[in-house]
């Protein structure tokens, strides 16, 4: 394909990438990128901008002080810093998180992997391997409003799964396909890859990432469900 394209969408399931020939291969050793300028931006765009830059943003909240609540006040390392692609950056946002499940989860990625929907409609609250399950449930319970839910402990934290998304979108062995969808799927506690994926690439992905990746060859996936 002459037209290369990649679209990243953030939501309760994490970063989604729809890629055709934009996949340029697994990042070589020493591959670097630049921490994006996020200061002053609304917290809602953090995942999208960070993913576009090839870094993983972990949000922390602090008292708003002189700053407008919900805006980014600091990024560590500082914007413009050269870092290894897939690195985690800390993004400090003014004020407390909003009251929806999505907002609560996005504000505490050290605890939560994300929110997903199981096949029977149960809301899945996915947490990291070291998270306190009761504390996590206490955070989101008011926003669930009685909705049927389940807490699911994942073997990998959100930052590690998001790093896999960054790596996979750059693999050389995916360039032969016509397009694929990729997302952190909290219900699976894994990265889900769907689409036109060569058989050799399917095998390589499964061997490299084991149970942190689910590969489903076929038509490129639609966006994963949101709640």
Image (tube, rainbow, N blue to C red):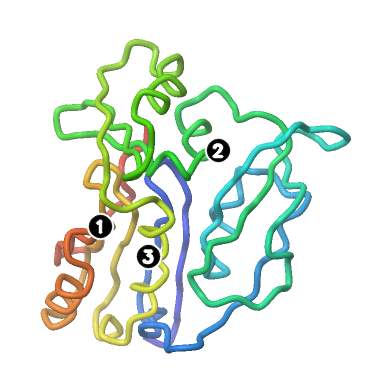
Residue 95 vertical placement versus 84 (above, below):
above
Quadrant location of the N terminus in the rendered image? bottom left
Q: Residue at x 44, y 88 (%)?
A: 29
Residue 192 vertical placement versus 86 (above, below):
above
The residue where tag 2 is placed is 107
Q: Quadrant of residue 221?
A: bottom left
Q: Secondary structure at mark 3?
A: helix
Q: Nearer the viewer, residue 75 or 69?
A: 75
Please tell me how crowded label 1 is: few (under 14), some (14-19), or many (20+) other residues with Cα within 10 Å: many
**C-beta proximity under 8 Å, tags 2 and 3:** no
Q: Quadrant of residue 70?
A: top right
Q: Residue at x 75, y 31 (%)?
A: 63
Q: Nearer the viewer, residue 164 or 11?
A: 164
Mark found first going from the N terminus, 3 or 1 = 3
Q: Position of residue 116 (x, y in %)?
A: 30, 37
The residue where tag 3 is placed is 165
Q: Residue at x 73, y 63 (%)?
A: 37
Quadrant location of the C terminus in the rendered image? top left
Is 193 left or right of 169, judged from the image as shown?
left
Is 200 left or right of 174, judged from the image as shown?
left
Q: Which mark is residue 192?
A: 1
Q: CA distance from mark 3 to mark 1?
A: 9 Å
Is 166 left or right of 74, judged from the image as shown?
left
Q: CA distance from mark 2 to mark 3?
A: 20 Å
Mark found first going from the N terminus, 2 or 3 = 2
Residue 205 vertical placement versus 149 (above, below):
below
């Amino acid at each position: 394909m002459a037209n290369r394209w990649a679209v990243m969408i953030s939501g309760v399931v994490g970063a989604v990438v729809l890629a055709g020939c934009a996949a340029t291969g697994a990042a070589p050793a020493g591959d670097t990128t630049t921490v994006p300028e996020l200061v002053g931006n609304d917290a809602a765009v953090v995942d999208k901008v960070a993913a576009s830059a090839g870094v993983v943003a972990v949000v922390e909240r602090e008292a708003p002080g002189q700053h407008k609540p919900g805006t980014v006040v600091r990024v560590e390392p500082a914007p413009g810093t050269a870092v290894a692609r897939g690195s985690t950056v800390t993004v400090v946002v003014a004020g407390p998180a909003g009251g929806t499940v999505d907002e609560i989860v996005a504000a505490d990625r050290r605890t939560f992997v994300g929110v997903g929907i199981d096949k029977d409609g149960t809301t899945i609250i996915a947490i990291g391997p070291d998270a306190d399950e009761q504390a996590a449930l206490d955070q989101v319970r008011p926003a669930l409003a009685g909705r049927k839910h389940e807490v699911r402990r994942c073997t990998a934290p959100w930052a590690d799964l998001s790093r896999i998304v960054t790596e996979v979108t750059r693999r050389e062995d995916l360039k032969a396909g016509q397009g694929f969808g990729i997302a952190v799927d909290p219900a699976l506690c894994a990265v889900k890859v769907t689409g036109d994926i060569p058989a050799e690439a399917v095998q390589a992905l499964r061997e490299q990432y084991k149970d942190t990746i689910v590969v489903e060859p076929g038509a490129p996936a639609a966006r994963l469900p949101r709640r």
